[in-house]
Image (cartoon, grey):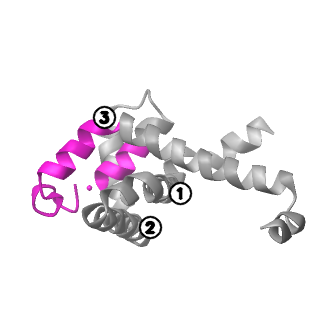
Amino acid sequence: MKKLNGLVSHETWASLIGMIYLGLIVNLLLVVSSLPLVVLLVTTDPLYSWPLLAIAVGLVALVAISEVPTARLRDVLRAGLYLSLRRWYLTAASLAALAAQVAVFATAPALGLGLTASAALFFAWTNSRFTLRPVLDLDEKAAAQA
């Protein structure tokens, strides 16, 4: 152990432990904030209770609402339906990541909620945000802020 301590500095260990701690805390806060959804996932079978076209439009619509909170629900759902089908490859990747997360959750709930939930949701959010690019004009907002 002394040999290992000599090769790795204290700052490196502190950074590594801090990064692990940050990931665990983010996942804990995610579980606490989405507890009703977790209870629903535990008590029902999502494969039979939610149609696939709904878990895709809903995903894109939730991201759209978070980006533009003043948007009308009808416009958000219309854009979500159109863009999730137009950019089906991004929607499929997001749904595959969420399906993998559900599979991990079904086999090992502590691992699914404790380690992989935030990464899967972040991946789905970034794909959905990129799907909404034609509607949100994200490049113009970034240029205006710079």
Q: Earlier in the sequence, mark 2 or mark 3?
A: 3
Mostly what secondary structure, the magenta segment?
helix
Amino acid type indicated by mark 2: Leu
Tell me the magenta residue range.
34-63
Residue 138 has which mark? none
The quadrant of the picture occupied by the C terminus is top right
Instruction: Name the secondary structure under disc 2.
Output: helix
Picture residue at 13% right of the left edge, 58% below the top: 45
Q: Which mark is residue 90?
A: 2
Q: Circle 1 sits in a helix, a strand or a loop, which is it?
A: helix
Residue mark closest to the camera, 1 vs 3: 1
Circles 2 and 1: CB atoms closer than 8 Å: yes
Q: Residue at x 40, y 66 (%)?
A: 97
Q: Mark 2 and mark 1: span between their CA atoms?
A: 8 Å
Q: Amino acid at mark 1?
A: Phe
Say if the magenta span includes residue 53.
Answer: yes
Could you tell me how far apart the alpha carbons at marks 1 and 3 are, in whole angstroms? Answer: 20 Å
Locate residue 140 relative to residue 50 in the image: left or right: right
Residue sitting at 50 percent across and 57 percent down? 119
User: Is any atom of residue 135 visible in this view?
Assistant: yes
Whichever of labels 1 and 3 marks the residue nearer the N terminus, that label is 3
Instruction: Report the Cα–Cα distance between label 2 and label 3.
Output: 22 Å
Question: Which residue corresponds to mark 3?
Answer: 73
Choose mark 2 or mark 3, whichever is in front.
2
Q: Which residue is mark 1?
A: 130
